[in-house]
């Protein structure tokens, strides 16, 4: 599962100059951040920057490196080649199927710097002509590999299918997701492979701090537009059946980044699933959800739902409440939805948002182990939290004095304690 290539010595700090050009500074090692704790990543924590990853320059933030002689975290506040010009910290936004061991290390220029956009910010350094990140490959699945996306092929196939399904609003919506927002799931639908998205809900019963489809105007912008209509059961079934009929081991999933909470449309989704299952037993029907409505989950199981991906930021009720800011449900309802699925022998994944310094906090680790012991999900999907770390810690009032376990220790302990638990990144095919 993990890439085996690691550097032979520590990479050095990288920064952006006043023109936004990325440079390295050989006199400092790269630093990794776990909450408020800073350190030099171990060599085994480092892999080459995955293909398809992106570089982010972090405005209003100066990089922090590690002094080669003392091992202490050191603020890098001036470019020696241009001491009077501004510099900025740099982070990597990694390609899918990779999970961070450390966030990038920086210091704000002042406390009033606006939050960073809703992406994940992984520690990155430079060594022997290559960029390295503090991360690991969390799933061998290639469904969203950059080399698998040929833009000309995608555009051709997308336009062809948009013309074929002119009267299906859901297909037309996914066309925008594909061609405008470059959504990997939408691309795979039009390429007729792997997993197809089925967004359904323009509304939500949570007000997540880090919601990627809806943010207040005074905050950082959302990364994509939310769907504005509820598709009919026929539109949903038509899209799903077109995918299942062409794709071996196909997955179709309700609950996408371009919508609210799909369970709020449980009646529509239930009818759609029934229509699909009347015509085929093939394909995995999955729902990605905040799992707030156990009764709705039970209904969808009856209609033919195969799997549930439960999105949580934390296994602690109070931290879940602070992030999701739920309306009319609690973490107890989430746990009940898991129980309903497992009582019916259905597959459950935890879409567990990973943030170094929070995920591997000892109290959070204990709470997660309790949840795994009591609820017995089948899988954890190791997705990076797409949110400014400072903003997240401030909103959750999470400033522990005890050092984190370290994400590699966390990962090894989860594997050791729960050997039957599947770890990955994507919804797996079950049929």
Image (cartoon, rainbow, N blue to C red):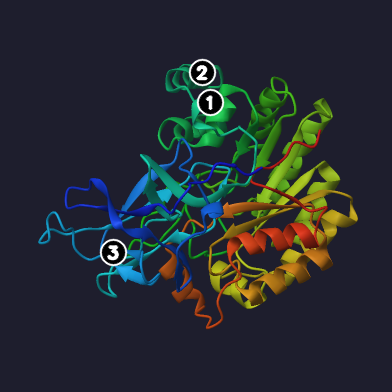
Residue under label 3, please give it: 61
Side of 343 where 19 appears, left or right:
left
Percent x, y for residue 63? Answer: 31, 62
Q: Measure how far apart labels 2 and 1 are at the Cα level.
A: 14 Å
Foreground residue among 345 and 39: 39
Q: Secondary structure at mark 1?
A: helix
Residue at 69% x, 42% y: name it: 427
Marks 3 and 1, the one that precedes in the sequence? 3
Give the CA distance from mark 2 to mark 3: 42 Å
Q: From the top left corner, tell me how far across and down residue 309 is, in percent.
A: 70, 51
Q: What is the distance, in whole Å, between disc 3 and disc 1 at their CAs?
A: 35 Å
Q: Which mark is residue 148?
A: 1
Which image quarter holds the N terminus?
A: top right
- Does residue 372 appear anywhere in the picture? yes
Residue extending farthest bottom: 401
Q: Position of residue 16 (x, y in %)?
A: 25, 52
């Amino acid at each position: 599962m993990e890439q085996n290539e690691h550097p032979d010595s520590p990479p050095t700090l990288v920064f952006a100059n006043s023109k936004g050009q990325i440079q390295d500074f050989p006199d400092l090692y790269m630093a990794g951040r776990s909450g408020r704790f800073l350190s030099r990543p171990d060599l085994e924590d480092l892999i080459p920057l995955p293909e398809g990853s992106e570089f982010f320059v972090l405005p209003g933030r100066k990089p922090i490196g590690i002094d080669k002689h003392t091992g202490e975290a050191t603020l890098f506040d001036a470019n020696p080649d241009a001491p009077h010009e501004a510099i900025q910290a740099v982070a990597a936004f990694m390609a899918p199927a990779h999970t961070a061991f450390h966030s990038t290390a920086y210091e704000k220029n002042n406390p009033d710097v606006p939050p960073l956009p809703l992406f994940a910010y992984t520690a990155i350094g430079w060594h022997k002509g290559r960029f390295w990140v503090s991360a690991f490959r969390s799933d061998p699945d290639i469904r969203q590999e950059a080399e698998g996306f040929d833009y000309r092929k995608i555009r051709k196939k997308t336009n062809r299918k948009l013309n074929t399904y002119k009267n299906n609003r859901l297909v037309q919506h996914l066309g925008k997701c594909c061609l405008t927002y470059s959504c990997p799931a939408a691309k795979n639908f039009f390429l007729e492979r792997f997993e197809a998205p089925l967004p359904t809900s323009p509304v939500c019963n949570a007000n997540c701090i880090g919601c990627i489809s809806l943010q207040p105007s005074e905050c950082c912008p959302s990364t994509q537009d939310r769907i504005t209509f509820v598709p009919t059961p026929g539109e949903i079934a038509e899209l799903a059946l077109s995918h299942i009929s062409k794709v071996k081991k196909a997955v179709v999933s309700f609950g996408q980044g371009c919508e609210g909470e799909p369970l709020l449309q449980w009646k529509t989704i239930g009818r759609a699933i029934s229509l699909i299952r009347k015509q085929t037993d093939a394909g995995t029907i999955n729902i990605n959800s905040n799992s707030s409505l156990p009764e709705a989950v039970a209904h969808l199981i009856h209609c033919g739902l195969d799997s549930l991906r439960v999105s949580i930021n934390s296994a602690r009720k109070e931290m879940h409440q602070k992030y999701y800011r739920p309306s009319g449900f609690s973490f107890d309802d989430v746990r009940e939805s898991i129980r309903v699925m497992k009582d019916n022998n259905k597959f459950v994944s935890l879409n567990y948002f990973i943030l170094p310094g929070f995920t591997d906090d000892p109290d959070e680790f204990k709470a997660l182990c309790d949840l795994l012991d009591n609820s017995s999900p089948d899988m954890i999907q190791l997705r990076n939290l797409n949110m400014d770390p400072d903003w997240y810690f401030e909103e959750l009032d999470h400033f522990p004095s005890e050092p984190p376990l370290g994400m590699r220790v966390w990962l090894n302990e989860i594997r050791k304690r729960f050997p039957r638990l599947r770890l990955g990144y994507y919804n797996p095919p079950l049929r």
